[in-house]
Image (cartoon, rainbow, N blue to C red):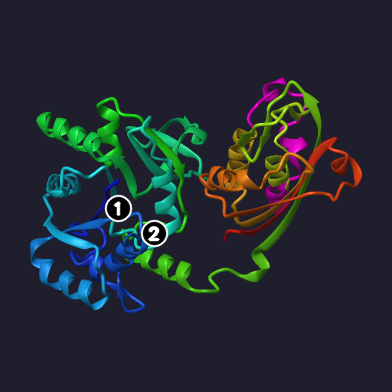
């Protein structure tokens, strides 16, 4: 499968006050090189197409050689608007391209993990995947005269980032239709959506900020500083859960359905691992436990997927200004053997933006676990309070 990346570095930087914004160096590395490096390092990416202004071709070539960037196979001249620049790049890609990632060079703190996350989430049943983050502030819409017209539900609103990933043929078709109508969208996904494409979101990265004003450079430098947060902001949360086996139910652990003749008894889907993770997250934020937020006396949570509860928990932490940094887990089960399913569990949970490690242990035939009466899980979460 051929995967290509487009890095857009053709903007005029009007709000920044410099047309050469992407050439600005932070710790002696230009912003556009920082934006390219994760794509350069990933084996999944075959080639990179860089889009910039014609007068910058010589300069960017110099930096590409200086920093030993090998995957940039073409440098394309940008257009008047960002959409024109992307379209120029799309038309230049070889027709055997299967997947294309589109990323703004003005987001230099992009990580390999985020690129992998959007790529892994692109399936044949969807047309595109975009990273996004929750909105923490209250959002209102304003009528003429600066009069507040109402308050929007921030739970259904998201801040969208790049890289955005699409099946190449589908995004190219959306662009062609947009130009037939002389339509300009706000991002690449908006064109795919306009012509009936299905785009899904995955958890983005708060550090994947866009450099728009000089102040954004200060925020970037703060993120890059090794001790950019005070150790006193660190928090640790512990989670534990256990469920007995029950006939006639599916066995779901870590969001993965595991073939077994019994499931776990519970009000929801009884995902013992996710429940332990949720408790560790809430503990890290000092916000009680799973029963406080999702009580088993509430019918809306009957048989609900615990992955949905985990997504809700992450929103709770976001509103509390708490960022989970790392989660380590252990599942205790005599049977079935769970280690073959751990990679899928980690991928499922990791797609929500959680850095996680999962282990599986037996209980050496001791206790209710050893007697194969049920399964338990423990989780430890390290997080921090955002300033």
Q: Position of residue 374 (x, y in %)?
A: 82, 36
Q: Is residue 73 left or right of residue 246?
A: left
Query: Do the CB atoms of the residues marked 2 and 1 lie less than 8 Å apart?
Result: yes
Query: Circle 1 sits on which residue?
Result: 103
Q: Position of residue 42 (x, y in %)?
A: 37, 60
Asked which quadrant contains residue 276, the reply is top right
Q: Within 10 Å of the Cα at label 1, are there few (<14), some (14-19), or many (20+) other Cα atoms?
A: many
The residue sitting at 39% across, 36% down in the picture is 123
Q: Position of residue 294 (x, y in %)?
A: 71, 32
**Element assignment for label 2:** loop
Query: Circle 2 sits on which residue?
Result: 110
* Residue 368: image tag: none
**Element assignment for label 1:** strand
Q: Is residue 45 left or right of residue 225?
A: left
Q: Which residues are magenta?
A: 280-305
Look at the image and say whether residue 283 sits in the magenta stretch. yes
Dot placed on the residue nearer the N-terminal end, 2 or 1:
1
Is the C terminus in the top left, top right, bottom left or bottom right quadrant?
A: bottom right
Look at the image and say whether residue 290 sits in the magenta stretch. yes
The residue sitting at 26% across, 62% down in the picture is 16
């Amino acid at each position: 499968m051929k995967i290509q990346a487009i890095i857009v570095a053709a903007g005029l930087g009007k709000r920044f006050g410099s047309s050469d914004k992407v050439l600005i160096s932070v710790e002696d590395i230009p912003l556009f090189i920082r934006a390219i490096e994760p794509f350069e390092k990933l084996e999944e990416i075959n080639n990179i197409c860089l889009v910039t202004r014609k007068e910058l071709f010589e300069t960017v070539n110099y930096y590409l050689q200086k920093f030993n960037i090998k995957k940039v196979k073409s440098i394309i001249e940008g257009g008047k608007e960002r959409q024109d620049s992307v379209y120029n790049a799309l038309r230049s890609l070889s027709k055997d391209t299967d997947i294309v990632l589109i990323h703004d060079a003005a987001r230099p703190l992009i990580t390999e993990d985020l690129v992998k996350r959007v790529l892994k989430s692109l399936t044949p049943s969807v047309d595109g995947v975009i990273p996004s983050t929750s909105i923490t502030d209250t959002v209102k819409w304003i009528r003429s005269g600066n009069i507040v017209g109402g308050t929007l539900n921030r739970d259904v609103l998201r801040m969208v980032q790049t890289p955005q990933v699409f099946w190449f043929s589908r995004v190219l078709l959306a662009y062609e239709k947009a130009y037939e109508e002389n339509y300009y969208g706000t991002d690449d996904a908006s064109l795919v959506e306009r012509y009936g494409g299905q785009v899904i979101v995955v958890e983005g990265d708060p550090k994947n900020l866009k450099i728009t004003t000089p102040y954004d450079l200060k925020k970037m430098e703060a993120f890059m500083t090794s001790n950019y947060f005070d150790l006193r902001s660190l928090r640790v949360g512990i989670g534990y859960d256990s469920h007995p086996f029950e006939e006639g139910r599916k066995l779901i652990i870590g969001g993965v359905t595991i073939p077994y003749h019994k499931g776990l008894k519970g009000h929801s889907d009884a995902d013992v691992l996710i429940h332990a993770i949720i408790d560790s997250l809430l503990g890290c934020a000092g916000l009680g436990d799973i029963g406080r937020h999702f009580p088993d006396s509430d019918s809306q949570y009957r048989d609900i997927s615990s992955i949905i509860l985990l997504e809700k928990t992450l929103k709770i932490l976001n509103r509390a200004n708490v960022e989970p940094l790392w989660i380590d887990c252990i599942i205790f089960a005599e049977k079935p053997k769970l280690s073959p399913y751990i990679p899928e569990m980690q991928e499922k949970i990791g797609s929500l933006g959680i850095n996680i490690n999962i282990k599986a242990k037996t209980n050496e035939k001791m206790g209710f676990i050893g007697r194969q009466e049920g399964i338990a899980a423990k989780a430890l979460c390290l997080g921090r309070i955002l300033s």
